[in-house]
Image (cartoon, grey):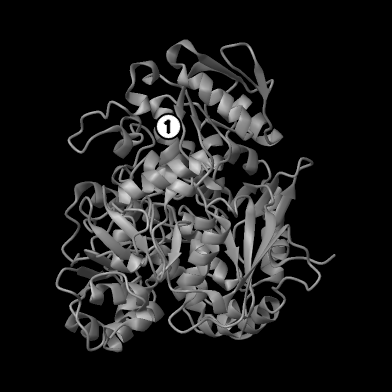
Amino acid sequence: MAKTLYDKIWDDHLVHEADDGTCLLYIDRHLIHEVTSPQAFEGLRMAGRKVRAPGKTLAVVDHNVPTTDRSKGIDDPESKLQVDTLARNAAEFGVDYFDENDERQGIVHIIGPEQGFTLPGTTIVCGDSHTSTHGAFGALAHGIGTSEVEHVLATQTLIQKKAKNMRVTVNGELPDGVGAKDIILAIIGEIGTAGGTGHVIEFAGDAIRALSVEGRMTVCNMTIEGGARAGLIAPDEKTFAYLKDTPRAPKGADWDAAVAYWETLYSDDDATFDVEITLDAANLPPTVTWGTSPEDVIPISGSVPDPAGVEDAGRKQALERSLKYMGLAPGTKITDVPIDRVFIGSCTNGRIEDLRQVAEIAKGRQVAETVNAMVVPGSGLVKAQAEAEGIDKVLTEAGFDWREPGCSMCLAMNADKLEPEERCASTSNRNFEGRQGRGGRTHLVSPSMAAAAAIAGRFIDVRELD
Amino acid sequence: MDKFDKLTGVGAPLPMINIDTDMIIPKQFLKTIERTGLGKHLFDEMRFNQDGSEKEDFVLNKPAYRNAEILVAGENFGCGSSREHAPWALKDFGIRCVIATSFADIFYNNCFKNGILPIALPQEDVDKLMDDAERGANATITVDLEKQEISGPDGGTIKFDLDPFKRHCLLEGLDDIGLSLEKKDNIDTFEAKQADTKPWL
C-alpha cells in the first residue's frame, strides 16, 4: 500500500499496537533542556528508575542562560538553580551535557542538527514545542510535556495514537526578498493556528525543495504555530550534505547504509493525505504579524484589520483584544508603525544563514537612533562561524548588539525582555501577549525584514530600503 | 496520578479563543524545579496588575468563581508552548476539568498525565455550558467520566467522547510509565532488530 513519509517513519518505530489503536512508539533521539526536565528526573529518582538509553539522550542549557558574558556564572538564583540541576541530573544519570560555557552549547533545536544528533527517518522528542524543527531532515519530531519526558527517559518509548496526514505544497519560485519565514507565516495565515491540530504536516513542492536546510528548519519550526505537532520534509542531497561529517552522523560504511535508507524516505506518488493545501510561492509577499496570534499575518503592503466587518463573535472579540494589546488602530498601514526594538535569533531564525541575511542588509547602513537591536546567535558554533566570516563586525559597526547564544528574548526567561508597550520586530515564533515581556508588543518577521526595520525604525519592505 | 471519576463544581466562564499556555502560566514562573505551587500564578497577567493586586474583572477573582473547579473556554485552548506547567498551575489552583470546542494537541495530552479531564464539545454545547457557568456559584456542573456525561444545573445532560485508553488511565489513576515498562520485552526486541537493520543509530 502506498505510504506517506509519516506512515513510513511511524511503521518503522512501532513497538506495540493495542486493539484500540494505542501504540508504543520507539524514540531514537531525546533532547533535554533545563526548564522542562527537572521534574522528570526527580520522578525517575522517586521511582528508583534509570535512563534506559543515555546514549540516545543529549542535554543542553538554553532557555534561561544570560546572553551576556557568563564565564563567571549566572546571577539570577532561580535560573542558576535550574541550570545547576540539569548539570547534576545529567551527571547522575549518565547523559551527555553541553553547559553554558561549552562552545557547542546553544538552542536545543539548533545544536541537534549541528551535532548530527538529528538524522533522517528517526523519531525525535524534546520537552519543547519547537522540536518540530527537526522535521526538516525527514525526522518525525515533536514536543512533549514533562511527564512524557520522564516516560521517554525511563522507557525510550512514547504512548501515541497515530495522527492524520496533511500536506502543504508550495509550488513555483519565491520573489526576491521573500524567504522561508514568509512561507511559514503565510501557511499559518491560511490554515489558522488550529489548522493542523491532530495532523502531521508534510511540506512539499518546488519552493520547499529550493530552500536550504536552514530555511526548511524555519518552516518546520513553526509547524506547531499551525497547530500540528510535527512537520516533515523529505530528505535529499542537501540534507545529506548538511549532515555529512557532523560529529554524531554515521561514518564510513554506516554512512553509506544510512544514505541508502534515507533515500527511501519520501511519500509514495499515490499516497493519500487527509488534507491537502496548495500555495503559489510567486504570490507570497514579505509578511508581518500585526496581532497576538501567529495567524494574524498581513503583507508588508497591508494594513491592520478592522474588526467592524467580522461576523463571528469569538473572532471579533479576539481581534479587538489584540488591537488594544498591540496599541494599533484599525486600518493603520503597517509601514507607518514605528518600532523600538529588534530581536534577531531563536530556534526559528538563529542559524548562520539567517545572520548572513541580516549582515547583507546591515552592511554599510546604521540602526535607527530610536531602535535597540540585538542579535543572538543560535549556538556557540553559529557564533564562531559568524565571527570567522566577519558578520559580527558588520553588525556591530551598523549598531547591532552582538550577544552570547541562547533562547533569549524569544521567550524572555532571561534578562532579555521588552518593557511594557515596547514594540519589537522579532525573528522568533510567537507574538502572544506577554511573550517577550509583560505588555511587550511582538511582530513576527523574517531576518531580512527585521534588519530592514532596525535600519528604517519602522516596518518597511526590505526591497525598498535605500 | 490522581484518579478522576466524577466531579461536581463551579464552572468558570472564559469566553476567549486561542488561550495559549503563555497566558495560563507566563515564563517567569517556569524557573521552578517543582510540580506544585504554581496555582497562585495561574493566568498571572490576566489575573493580577503589575503591582500584584487583583484585577477585579477577571473571572477567577470574582467571589462566585474563586473556588471554580471547571473552566469553560473557547476554541484551541492550550495552544503554544508544550510547558506542562500549564496543567500543573490549573490543578494547583483547583481546576480539574476544562471544557472547550477544541484543544491544542500537546496541552490536551499533558492534562491526562495530571488527572485533569479536557472535554471537547460542539459549539452549541459549549455555548450552553458557558451560559450555565455565567450563572456563578449557584450553578454547579457535574462531570461524570464513567458515564461520559455532563449535567448542567437545570438537569439537562450532554454526552462527550473520549479515547478509551485515556479514559481508563484517568478513571484508575494509572502510572503509564509502569504500563509501558510491562512491555519491556517488546522494547528489547525492537532495539535488537533496529541495531541489526540500522546500525548507525
Q: Is residue A255 left or right of residue A265?
A: left
In this view of the protein, which residue sits in the foreground, A199 or A105? A199
In the picture shown, does residue A246 fall above or below B132? below
Q: Residue at x 45, y 54 (%)?
A: A128
Can residue A1 be seen?
A: yes
Query: Badge 1 local density, few (<14 within 10 Å), some, or many (20+)?
Result: many
Q: Position of residue B168 (x, y in %)?
A: 67, 30
Q: Is residue A111 left or right of residue A13?
A: left
In the picture shown, does residue B73 fall above or below A23? above
The chain under label 1 reads B
In this view of the protein, which residue sits in the foreground, B74 or A200? B74
Instruction: Please state which amino acid type lies under the numbered disc 1.
Output: Leu
Q: Position of residue B24 (x, y in %)?
A: 39, 39
In the picture shown, does residue B93 fall above or below A329? above
Q: Residue furthest right?
A: A1
Can residue A404 be seen?
A: no
| Quarter that holds the C terminus of chain B | bottom right
Q: Position of residue A245 (x, y in %)?
A: 50, 84
In the picture shown, does residue B106 fall above or below A352? above
Q: How many marks?
A: 1
In this view of the protein, which residue sits in the foreground, A461 or A118? A461
Q: Is residue B7 left or right of residue A107?
A: right
Q: Position of residue A270 (x, y in %)?
A: 81, 70
Q: Secondary structure at mark 1?
A: helix
Q: Residue at x 54, y 54 (%)?
A: A192
Residue named by callout 1: B90
Q: Residue at x 53, y 69 (%)?
A: A118
Q: For residue A410, what is the image quadrant?
A: bottom left
